[in-house]
Image (tube, rainbow, N blue to C red):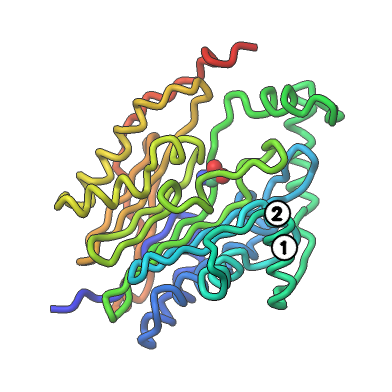
Amino acid sequence: MATEPLMICSENGAIGLEAGLRVLRAGGRALDALEAAALPVELNRQDRTVGIGGVPNLLKQVQLDAGIMDGATLSVGAVAALEGYLEPVRVARKVLELLPHSLLVGPGAARFAQEHGFEQAEHLTAEAEAQWRARLQERGVWPVDEDHLTECCRRALREERWGGTVNFIALDRAGDLAACVSTSGIGWKYPGRVGDSPQAGAGFYADNRCGAACCTGRGELAIQGGTALRTVIHLEQGLAPLEAGTRAMQFLRRVRDGWGGGMNLLVLDRTGRHAGFSSVTGRKYAYQSISMDEYAMEERTCVEIGQEETQERYPF
Ligand code: GLY
């Protein structure tokens, strides 16, 4: 029996599920469902970690990262450090469709968005700017010394909780899987810092043969652990989503860069089984299939990853 089309997402993505489900109910593609679902989150000014309203980097620039992957073809499109354009997931999808490339960064990504008629917008909101300034003042790095951004970054991001970012995974009627991530990254980041979200294998991965996975949390951990691809490889090896995700999270115990941070992971296999994980307790994710009138929230399994902030490698 064919699996019912469905989507899963991080908690902050729930506001986009209905738009995505409309696409799936009409028999549309998983990739199109992801684009539709991501947009309301990217336009949500209250979300300080995605699109408009994101907390800026040390130079008060909102730099966006997004990635999307087609599990049928393993094609990837992604943009990193994109400034001034709405709909980063849609821009990433265009990269996937039109270019012989997977990832565009900074001015190149903006140029591509402009070439394809994407709408421009100011992403910095007054609320995000206030939050940005308050942290810098509290950490004694206000005003920002542009000649010493490394020190400003180290001070601003000590004991950071590393939350936010949105994940969506969709399974459509044809059995195709797709995954996407969108984020403004960590606020107060060093200009040009790129996290896991636009990096296939780190922040997202999808393969129709077995399943898909996406991450939120401290992107550097997912990069160092290859977390999304590692999870999908475990699915390919025959593990159920609960076991595959647990192993990929446990692998992060090997990362010892001294900067701490947490990780959250979502997994959907090709038969529609799903699971969510977090390195802290009490986190949830949302899911909805086409026969459900509204989304449901599910508790994430807590897997401790042992990331204490020690600064051993980088003492102050
Ligand atoms: N996981 C999003 C980021 O680290 O930028």
Q: Is residue 255 left or right of residue 94?
A: left
Q: Residue at x 79, y 44 (%)?
A: 60
Q: Disc 2 on helix, strand or loop?
A: helix
Mark 2 vs 1: CB contact within 8 A: yes
Few, some or many residues within 10 Å of mark 1 (<14, 14–19, 20+): many
Tell me which amino acid carries mark 2: Gly
Q: Nearer the viewer, residue 263 or 190?
A: 190
Residue denoted by label 1? 110
Compared to residue 201, the image places residue 97 above or below, namely below
Q: Is residue 269 left or right of residue 132?
A: left
Q: Residue at x 37, y 43 (%)?
A: 227
Residue denoted by label 2? 106
Tell me which amino acid carries mark 1: Ala
Q: Disc 1 on helix, strand or loop?
A: helix
Which quarter of the rendering shows the N terminus?
Answer: bottom left
Q: Position of residue 306 (x, y in %)?
A: 37, 24
Measured in 3D between alpha carbons, the distance from the residue under mark 2 to the one under mark 1, in whole angstroms, is: 6 Å
Q: Position of residue 275 (x, y in %)?
A: 28, 52
> Residue 277 appears in which quarter of the rendering?
top left
Q: Residue at x 30, y 75 (%)?
A: 5
Compared to residue 175, the image places residue 277 above or below, namely above
